[in-house]
Image: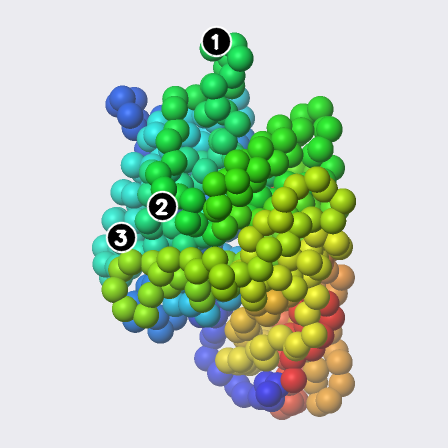
């Protein structure tokens, strides 16, 4: 159903189908606490009575990564997954300066675990959703964020629904090196048996393999996959054929994976996650790589097969139609604002605006895709929306109220809402 409306309304605020809550903590010099300031943003869909899980989008090392992460909870596409499963979307921001020691947060035992758990407790109180403090997590981590997720796997295996390691893991760093003085070594990490029951995907970029700077992301993912799979863990290997360390179009595969895992593991009632039934999945090996077959949730197989071959996924269904269109007369003309959900399979690229049956504009007119497909919310290197955040707002300059307007969503593969 497309929107068809032309009304004169009072001044409008930008619409938002959900609420975002934030907490911030200063840097600490106390032993065992986080030496960097941190902010945690949590978005909860409108109308959710009970938050069933937290989808955590953890950025990587460096000042550029944490500056880009301030919009993680504002991502319309990731919000679509959270909305489907009555989950919250969290975007942690660890304010590490460019020359700061990333290990002081990406190893959660150095204080970021405590800060994360504190944030969940404080956000539970602030949002009026006490269950946020104890809900299970889907962990996504890029680079240092993947390092962080791999150790959180050891610390809280019973709370983790699934993990997506994008170009990062601490696995090779906690193995004993030949040189005991090597800086690569970190304090021992012991994975409990429950950790090997978590569905996971190792997702390096193919162009990291052999790269002077990022080769460790590739070799680390391979080593982790071999070890975990050898122990029977439900882990898959999903190399991105198009990228190096940037996240590219990873989100289309990752959201499909988390969608499948949430369906498998979220309990209908109670707090404990359902165990993974390995017989419900499928084993697949990546063509051209000398690695044993990984384990995939059955529902994720088509997306995985497309992604490892092309770097993206297919979508043959139209996106949801926009809703809540409102108009008002301004000095410039007729202002339109509306709301819309992103297409879970392929996101949101653009809006088509019609007046009296004729296309008068596209928003944005020329979507850009520096790090992947062109999207309404431009994407950063680390898979977060660019600033300033795109607004669902258009002014028909010079017009007077009286025309019939409608807005159409276009997803990232070019399909229009009906």
Q: Are marks 3 and 2 in contact (CB under 8 Å)?
A: no
Q: Earlier in the sequence, mark 3 or mark 1?
A: 3
Whether residue 396 is visible here, answered yes or no, is no
Q: Quadrant of the C terminus?
A: bottom right
Residue 391 sits above or below residue 190 on the image: below
Which residue matches tag 1? 181
Can you tell which quarter of the image residue 318 is in? bottom right
Residue 194 — which label? Answer: 2
Residue 115 sits above or below residue 358 on the image: above
Residue 231 — which label? Answer: none
In the structure shown, which secondary structural element does the residue marked by tag 2 occupy?
helix
Q: Earlier in the sequence, mark 1 or mark 2?
A: 1
Q: Residue at x 23, y 58 (%)?
A: 130
Q: Are marks 3 and 1 in contact (CB under 8 Å)?
A: no
In the structure shown, which secondary structural element does the residue marked by tag 3 occupy?
helix
Residue 133 — which label? Answer: 3
Report the coloring of the rendering. Answer: rainbow
Q: Earlier in the sequence, mark 3 or mark 2?
A: 3
Q: Residue at x 75, y 54 (%)?
A: 309
Q: Residue at x 57, y 44 (%)?
A: 202
Measured from the top left, where is residue 161 in percent x and y?
Answer: 41, 54
User: Label 3 to label 2, Cα distance in Å?
Assistant: 21 Å
4 on left or right of 139: right
Measured from the top left, where is residue 176 in percent x and y?
Answer: 47, 19
Whether residue 210 is visible here, answered yes or no, is yes
Along the viewing direction, whichever of 334 and 149 lies nearer the viewer? 149
Q: Which marked residue is nearer to the observer: mark 1 or mark 2?
A: 2
């Amino acid at each position: 159903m497309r929107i068809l409306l032309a009304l004169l309304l009072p001044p409008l605020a930008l619409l938002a189908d959900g609420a975002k809550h934030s907490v911030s903590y200063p840097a600490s010099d106390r032993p065992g606490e986080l030496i960097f300031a941190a902010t945690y943003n949590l978005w909860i869909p409108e109308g959710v009575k009970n938050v069933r899980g937290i989808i955590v989008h953890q950025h990587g090392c460096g000042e550029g990564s944490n500056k880009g992460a301030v919009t993680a909870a504002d991502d319309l596409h990731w919000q679509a997954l959270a909305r489907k499963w009555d989950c919250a979307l969290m975007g942690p921001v660890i304010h590490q300066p460019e020359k700061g020691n990333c290990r002081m947060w990406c190893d959660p035992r150095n204080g970021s675990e405590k800060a994360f758990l504190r944030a969940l407790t404080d956000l539970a109180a602030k949002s009026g959703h006490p269950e946020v403090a104890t809900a299970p997590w889907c962990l996504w981590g890029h680079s240092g964020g993947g390092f962080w997720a791999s150790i959180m796997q050891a610390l809280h295996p019973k709370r983790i629904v699934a993990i997506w390691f994008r170009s990062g893991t601490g696995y090779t760093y906690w193995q004993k090196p030949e040189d005991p003085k090597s800086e690569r070594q970190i304090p021992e990490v012991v994975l409990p048996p429950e950790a090997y029951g978590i569905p996971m995907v190792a997702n390096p970029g193919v162009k990291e393999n052999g790269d002077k700077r990022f080769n460790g992301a590739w070799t680390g993912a391979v080593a982790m996959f071999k070890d975990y799979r050898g122990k029977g863990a439900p882990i898959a290997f999903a190399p991105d054929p198009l990228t190096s360390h940037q996240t590219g179009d990873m989100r289309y595969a990752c959201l499909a994976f988390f969608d499948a895992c949430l369906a498998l593991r979220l309990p209908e009632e109670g707090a404990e996650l359902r165990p993974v039934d390995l017989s419900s999945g499928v084993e697949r090996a990546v063509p051209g790589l000398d690695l044993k077959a990984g384990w995939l949730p059955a529902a994720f197989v088509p997306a995985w097969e497309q992604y490892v071959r092309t770097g993206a996924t297919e979508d043959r269904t139209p996106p949801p139609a926009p809703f809540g269109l409102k108009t008002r007369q301004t000095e410039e003309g007729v202002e339109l604002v509306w709301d819309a959900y992103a297409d879970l399979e392929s996101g949101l690229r653009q809006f088509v605006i019609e007046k009296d049956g004729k296309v008068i504009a596209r928003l944005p007119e020329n979507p850009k895709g520096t790090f992947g497909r062109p999207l309404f919310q431009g994407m950063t290197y680390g898979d977060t929306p660019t600033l300033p955040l795109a607004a669902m707002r258009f002014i028909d300059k010079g017009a007077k109220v009286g025309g019939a307007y409608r807005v159409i969503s276009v997803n990232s593969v070019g399909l229009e809402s009906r």
